[in-house]
């Protein structure tokens, strides 16, 4: 989660690691001090060591933060899932053309915590070769990622992926200029392509599209996905929420980074050459940073405002026995 990883920076190197930083590790551990701890067998430079420890710190923070928040809300992971794209009515040619072909997904709500999890891409066509598939933000036209399916004529070929997109609209297309796919259709609720606003579930719609190459937003809707099939789940993704409250999270993350560096200083081969007094000092500082982390994590938990999201968040109610006043 880049918006959290970049919260803590480091000054003192040839190139300061400061992009979007709110806090700097230097207030607790200086750059020169880190040079005394680094083991070249572990990291090539202080910058590399800091970057990796910062990622580890954010991962640990997120795990602990989510665990602590379980007492305040219930986050449901997978809302619904299924395959979009069907050729059950036979192998009908979707002729090659100088167009993008694919599918457009749109969330049925504006809740920012609901994201698209693509787990598998498949292709079926009279074509052997690579099919380059591109994911676009359907609002901005930004290219989000690409994947390549190795197609074999007359066979359904698939690629296992694990991609999460938190956008309102998601377009998944390929350039059909030299690719002859078979017709694959979206699976509408009730097998009806004109009802329920093209919904494939209560949370998302899906429609086949074509568009001129290079202009994915200038699209035409139709029933054909051009041979593509997508295994898709709508999942709860709290990335947007956490990024919006990052100002509350910078201090605990900074102390978690400092805590991890004290652990490393005590266990690395360079750290093992320290005197007993040095080790006692490192242990003491490790305990201080750990304590400060726990204190500021608690403060962050008290300050954050939970999302007003009826899909992904459900307030926990406390059970108990109450005496009614007669």
Image (tube, grey):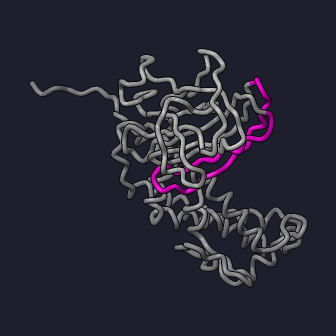
19 left or right of 303 in image: right
Residue 138 forms part of the magenta stretch: yes
Residue for point 48% across, 33% down: 222
Q: Which residues are magenta?
A: 128-155
Measured as percent of width and height from the top left, residue 322 is found at: 24, 27
Task: Report the number of discs.
Answer: 0
Quadrant including the C terminus: top left
Q: Residue furthest top?
A: 89
Q: Nearer the viewer, residue 209 or 144?
A: 209
Near-viewer residue (103 or 210): 210
Q: Quadrant of the N terminus?
A: bottom right
Residue 168: image x %, image y %? 44, 47
- The residue sitting at 34% across, 34% down in the picture is 317
Q: Residue at x 68, y 44 (%)?
A: 177
Depth check, front residue: 143 or 233: 143
Q: Is residue 124 above or below residue 108?
A: above
Q: Is residue 57 above or below residue 235?
A: below
The verdict on residue 73 being magenta is no
Q: Is residue 301 left or right of residue 17?
A: left
What predominant SS class does the magenta segment belong to?
Answer: strand
Position of residue 21 relative to residue 125, above or below, is: below
Where residue 62 sits in the image (x, y, percent)? 57, 51
Q: Quadrant of residue 270?
A: bottom right
């Amino acid at each position: 989660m880049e918006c959290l990883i970049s919260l803590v920076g480091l000054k003192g190197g040839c190139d300061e690691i400061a992009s979007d930083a709110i806090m700097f590790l230097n207030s607790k551990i200086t750059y020169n001090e880190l040079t005394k701890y680094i083991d070249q067998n572990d990291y090539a430079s202080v910058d590399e060591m800091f970057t990796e420890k910062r990622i580890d710190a954010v991962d640990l923070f997120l795990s602990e933060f989510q665990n602590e928040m379980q007492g305040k809300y219930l986050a449901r992971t997978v809302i619904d899932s299924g395959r979009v794209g069907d050729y059950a009515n036979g192998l009908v040619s979707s002729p090659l053309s100088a167009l993008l072909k694919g599918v457009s997904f749109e969330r049925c709500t504006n809740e920012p915590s609901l994201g698209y999890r693509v787990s598998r891409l498949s292709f079926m066509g009279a074509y052997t070769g690579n099919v380059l598939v591109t994911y676009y933000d359907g609002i901005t036209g930004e290219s989000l990622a690409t994947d390549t399916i190795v197609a074999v004529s007359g066979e359904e070929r698939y690629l296992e992926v694990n991609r999460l997109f938190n956008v309102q609209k998601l377009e998944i297309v390929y350039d059909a200029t030299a690719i002859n796919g078979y017709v694959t259709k979206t699976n509408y609720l009730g097998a009806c392509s004109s009802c329920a606003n093209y919904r494939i579930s209560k949370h998302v719609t899906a429609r086949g599209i074509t568009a001129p190459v290079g202009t994915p937003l200038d699209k035409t809707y139709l029933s054909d996905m051009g041979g593509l099939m997508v295994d898709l789940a709508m999942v709860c993704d709290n990335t947007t929420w956490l990024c919006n409250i990052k100002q509350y999270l910078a201090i605990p993350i900074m102390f978690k980074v400092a805590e991890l560096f004290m652990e490393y200083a005590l266990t690395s081969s360079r750290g093992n050459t320290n005197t007993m007094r040095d080790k006692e000092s490192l242990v003491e500082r490790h305990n201080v940073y750990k304590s400060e982390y726990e204190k500021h994590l608690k403060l962050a938990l008290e300050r954050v405002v939970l999302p007003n999201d009826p899909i992904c968040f459900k307030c926990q109610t406390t059970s108990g026995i109450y005496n009614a006043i007669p």
